[in-house]
Image (tube, rainbow, N blue to C red):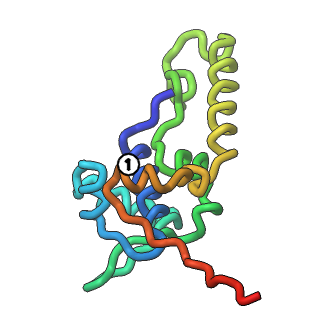
Amino acid sequence: MRLTRYTDYSLRMLIHLGLRQDRLCSIREVAEAYGISENHLMKVAHQLGLHGFVRTVRGRGGGLALARPAADIRVGEVVRRTEEDMALVECFSPGGTCPIAGVCTLQATLGEALEAFMAVLDRYTLADMLVPSGPMAARLGLALPAEPVSEPSLS
């Protein structure tokens, strides 16, 4: 199984936004952090917005943010929404021309493997992908917001 670059960029964008939940992010910022094309990310951001993963704020001071909590975004859901075709082999596609389709056990075996792959992805959320956030943020050149300092007790 190989995910498309589009899905990879979608997951990366969500991770970036998850690391920056304290503010809006620009597409340029995400592109620069990962060293990828802004044009690609504009398409990704648009689709992630249509699927309800990202909210966009237009205008000056606008940007992107997660549309829902990271703990509510399942990795499997993102993959299903961003992968155009989950057909591992020709016999998974409608109109395939394999002469042994339907009588070959390979189709069932690969179908089971795909289900297992997706079941693993369904167990994880975007929040799981953000741990540990410090080293990941540092690798991307991001400064995370400071942890709130608790006041000492006066007992």
- The residue beneath circle 1 is 9
Residue 96 in the figure: left or right of residue 4: right
**Which of the image's four quarters has the C terminus?**
bottom right
- Residue at left offset 65%, top offset 25%: 113
Residue at horizontal 55 percent and vertical 10 percent from the top: 99
Image coordinates of residue 25 in percent, x first then y, are: 35, 70
Identity, as a three-letter code, of the amino acid under mark 1: Tyr
Q: Which of the 4 image quarters holds residue 63?
A: bottom left
Q: Is residue 60 above or below residue 93?
A: below
Res 3 quadrant in image: top left
Find residue 61 and report its horizontal and vertical position in percent.
29, 83
Q: Rate crowding at label 1 as few (under 14), some (14 to 19) or many (20 or more) other CA atoms within 10 Å.
A: many
Q: Nearer the viewer, residue 84 or 143?
A: 143
Foreground residue, 25 or 6? 25
- Relative to 41, does residue 155 appear above or below in the rendering? below
* Secondary element at tag 1: helix
Q: Residue at x 53, y 35 (%)?
A: 86
Q: Could you tell me residue 52's position as x and y percent?
A: 53, 67
- Taking the image as shown, residue 100 lies to the left or right of residue 55, namely right
